[in-house]
Structure formats: structure tokens, C-alpha cells
Image: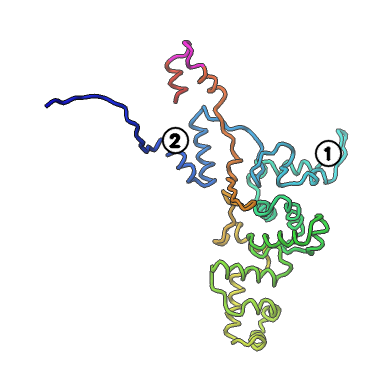
Amino acid sequence: MSIELNQRLQPALQVRVTPKQIAANAILAMSSVELTEAIAAELDENPALDMLEQSNCPICGSVITGSHCTDCLPKGAAGSGPAEVTDGGPIDWSAREEADELDPIARAEAEFTLQEHLTWTLHALLPHRLHPVADYAIGALDDNGFLTDSDEEIAAATDATVEDVQAVRESMRGVEPIGVGSRDVAESLLAQIAYLRETDEMEVPAGAEEIVRHHLADLGERRFALIASAIGIGTGEVLAAWEFVKVNLHPYPTAAFTAASGPGGSTRTIVRPDVLIRIVDGELQVEVIESRRFSLRVDPTYARLSAGMRSAEASETDRQHVRE
């Protein structure tokens, strides 16, 4: 009996997790805030990593090549303000205010306004052709968050159809604060009740919609017996609806936004999404919003050092430094 030893090549598949995949999975699991902190830490630790200096829109994250963001602000809006003439020539104050608005340093401590929130959110939800309609509707909101212009007036002002305006208002109904874009208090309260029923966030008392729709003035005057007699329910049910409206609903949408975004606000939080998923021509399109906010590269100095590492003049210490 003899034993023979030989070598031969045999292809085989083997799954291995590389350090690059581990790093990629860790990055994908980060939120936008965590990603910002991770990039800042890497920039401090790694001198070969460089971030390109560029101006980004604070709303959509797109690179600003001119004086304003072409995605968020129409060009016609620029320079529309009054100009003051001095010895050195006219001063366009509107352009200066716009530059301050888009300056990330000037906006660092600025509050996240309702107009910014609605503009950013509706531009993300609506096709590009409806952005001017949405911008006009946002500008037509009064101090309480109510839409003062009719659908026909908005359509005529934006050269759109009434159906386009209705599509914008329909998208606005699902945007926080719920009720923004309503015509009056009753419509705002009904929108909030419908939202609570749809999300099943809390139980809505029976008859609350009918009371708000037809007897809101009586409810404000606490004519509970009159309301109960008019709609055929008990006074206790009317009291329950009154308590529900008083505690859980905001008659004015701007008050809801202040409560959600201001100091010591409620648990309802207005957030910016990290990812947008749209259905375009029957296909899903996924866009990572934060991917437009950072532009990283290898520092040009280290790129040149890396290219010259094969030369005889490079020392082993330099090679090790650049390799790390």
C-alpha cells in the first residue's frame, strides 16, 4: 500500500465579509445627524480626507451655483425688492437678504420656519411643475395658517388649473401641522379629526365631526344641551367631544407648529426625511437627500504623495504615513 501526495487547483466559492462591507453597513445604518458627526470625526482624524467647499441649499441640499437655489426659489423672485441708490451705485437689498437666507452661517441659529418646512416638504411630495403653485399657496397663508385665496384665484395667478391647485391642497392636508391650508377653523379641526381617525392615534368621540361641522359656535358658547338636542345624542357625549377638541386639537395650524417645533414642545415632532421614495411612470425612484450635502475627496497633497511613493526618493516612513 502506497500513499501519494499531490497538489491541484480546485475552484471554490466562499463568502467573506470584508472590512469595506462592514464599514458600508455601519454607514448605511446612520441617520443624517450621525452621518454628519461621523464625517466631522473622520475629517479631524484623517488629514488625507478633504471636503470640498461648496454652497448648499439649506432646504433641499442641492449645490447652489448662483445667488439662489434654482430648485427651491424661482429666478423671478430674485431682485424683486426695492433698490437704494448711494454714491457707489444702487444697492439691491433683496439680493443681500436672499444671500443671508442661503448663508449656512447666518441660518445656523435661525428657527425652522413654517414656510421653510412647507416649502421643503411640498417640493418633495409634488412634481416639479406644481412647485410654483405650492409656493404661491404657501405665500397666501395668513398668520393663522389659513389659505386666504380661493382655488380659482391661485390658479389664475400661477397660470395653472383648478385641478392643479386642488392637488397641491390635497398634499398640504397630509403635511404637519395638520390643518394648514384650511379655509377656516372648522375645516382645520375636521382635518385634524380625520387624521387622528386615519392614523388611529387616539379614539375620537362619536359625533365629534358633526358637532364641529354644524355646531362649532354653539360649542364655543357651551350650549351643550342645545347641541345634544339638535343631533340626538346625550349631553355627556357632547361634553366628551368638547373636552376632546379642547385638549387634542388646535383651531389655528400655526399654533400646532409652534407647539411641535418650539422649546418645550409636545411629543409630536416635525422631521425631515433622509430618503424620498416616489412613483414615477409606474416605477419606484429612491433618492437619498443627504447624499447631496457632502462632497468628499482625497486631499490633493496626499494624492500627489501617493503617486510618488514608487520613486526612490520616498522614504519608508513617508510610505507608511501615506499608506495609513
Which residue is drawn at the image coordinates 45% and 42% (left, top)?
Answer: 26
Horizontal arrangement in the rendering, residue 269 relative to residue 143 (left or right):
left
| Predominant secondary structure, magenta span | loop
Q: CA distance from mark 1 to mark 2?
A: 53 Å
Q: In the image, what residue type sits under mark 1? A: Ile
Horizontal arrangement in the rendering, residue 304 relative to residue 134 (left or right):
left
**Quadrant position of the N terminus in the picture:** top left
Task: Report the residue that reaches farthest toward the left.
Answer: 1
Residue 105 appears in the rendering? no
The image quarter in which residue 17 lies = top left
Front-most of 13 and 116?
A: 13
Compared to 150, does 61 lie above or below? above
Compared to 96, does 212 lie above or below? below
Which residue is drawn at the image coordinates 59% and 76% (left, top)?
Answer: 243
Which residue is drawn at the image coordinates 81% and 63% (left, top)?
Answer: 152
Residue 284, x across and y down, in percent: 59, 51
Q: How is the image coloured?
A: rainbow
Tell which circle, 1 or 2, labels the residue nearer the N-terminal end. Answer: 2
Residue 108, x across and y down, in percent: 63, 44
**Quadrant position of the C terminus in the picture:** top left
Range drawn in magenta: 308-315
Q: Residues within 10 Å of mark 1 (few under 14, many from 20)?
A: few
Q: In the image, what residue type sits under mark 2? A: Lys
Q: Which residue is label 1 attached to? A: 91
Front-most of 34 and 281?
A: 281
Q: Which residue is label 2 attached to? A: 20
Compared to 310, does 214 lie above or below? below
Q: Helix, strand or loop at disc 2?
A: helix
Residue 47, x across and y down, in percent: 51, 28
Asked if the magenta segment contains residue 99, the reply would be no
Which residue is drawn at the image coordinates 57% and 24% (left, top)?
Answer: 300
Q: Residues within 10 Å of mark 2 (few under 14, many from 20)?
A: few
